[in-house]
Amino acid sequence: MVVRLLEKIGHNVISGLENGGKVIRLSTDAVVQLRHKPNWNHVLQQMVHLGVDSLPIVMLTMLFTGMVLTVQTAHEFIRYGAQASVGGVVFIAMGRELAPVLTAVVIAGRVGAAITAEIGSMKVTEQIDALKVMATNPVAYLVVPRLISCIVMLPILGIFANVIGTVGGYLVATSYSGISSFSYLHSIKLFAVITDVTGGLIKTMVFGAIVAIIGCYKGLNTAQGAEGVGRATTGSVVTSMILIFISNYFLSLMLYR
């Protein structure tokens, strides 16, 4: 029993290290391919698909996140006479953590799954092999446009999410908690600094790279037909979310020491 348990643990560790090495290799290949001119039409198409089409779900997520955050905190702040700090607290929480992390999680669920499903379907139908036969590098053709799109669009979505979340907090603070508009907006000017926003944007760039690389890696390594595509898609979303939360911790240590 113990031997089997140890064998299973060892197998999982070795498999994890092997997959990690393959992800690093894919990332390196994608960076190398960035030296060549990408297909900008393909990149723009991916930006629209991965970024612009995600605006509605990001808006709904962050609007209600800002509203819930204000509902939960405004009462306690008012109770201790600190209602003049609500706007600043909401803005800082949005800019540093909630906007970049929740946006990345939403994108991992929507975009990461779409990337894996699309490339995985190409893999099981041997379209990837056809690209190689036509002397087309799959990394340059499939991975690089999606990587560029995610790295560019995630910060834009992060700014949008930060604004929407702050607006949601403003609506609740002024209409539900009785905090004046001036007090809410003035506290943002008083407490917030530029690094609260720039730090979040740096996070979104890293998160975008994670979503793109993991989605492409899972898609390129899909096997066993339609069932394999489903497993790869699920694995892509789960792995991306785990890596987003882990990297968020270390990025927060570096950016907000």
Image (cartoon, rainbow, N blue to C red):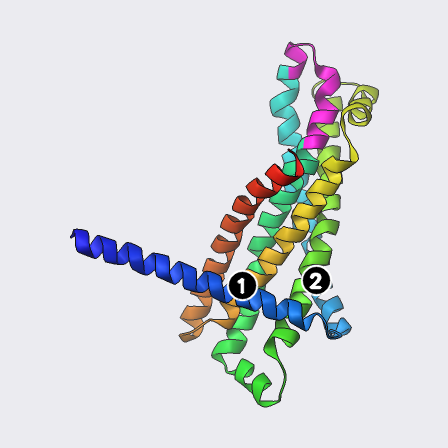
| Count of numbered badges drawn on the protein | 2
Q: Secondary structure at mark 2?
A: helix
Question: In the image, 220: left or right of 78?
Answer: left
Q: Mark 2 or 1, which is nearer the eye?
A: 1
Residue ID for mark 2: 149
Name which residue lies at 74% across and 26% down.
88
Residue at horizontal 68 percent and vertical 68 percent from the top: 145
Secondary structure mostly taken by the magenta-highlighted segment of the chain = helix
Q: Earlier in the sequence, mark 2 or mark 1?
A: 1
Q: What residue is shown with label 1? A: 24
Residue 242 % position (x, y): 49, 49
Looking at the image, residue 224 sits to the left or right of residue 196; the answer is: left
Q: Is residue 64 visible?
A: no
**Viewer-side residue, 194 vs 162:** 194
Cα gap from disc 2 to disc 1, whole angstroms? 19 Å
**Closer to the camera in the image, 57 or 104:** 104
Identity of the amino acid at label 1?
Ile
Please tell me whether residue 9 is drawn above or below residue 62 in the rendered image: below
In the displayed structure, would residue 176 be above or below residue 121?
above
Q: Is residue 123 left or right of residue 158?
A: left
User: Which image quarter: residue 133?
Assistant: bottom right
Q: Residues within 10 Å of mark 1 (few under 14, many from 20)?
A: some
> Does the magenta run of residues contain 255?
no
Query: What quarter of the picture does the C terminus occupy?
Result: top right
Residue 78 on the magenta span? yes
Confirm whether residue 228 shows in the render. Answer: yes
Image quarter for residue 65? Answer: top right
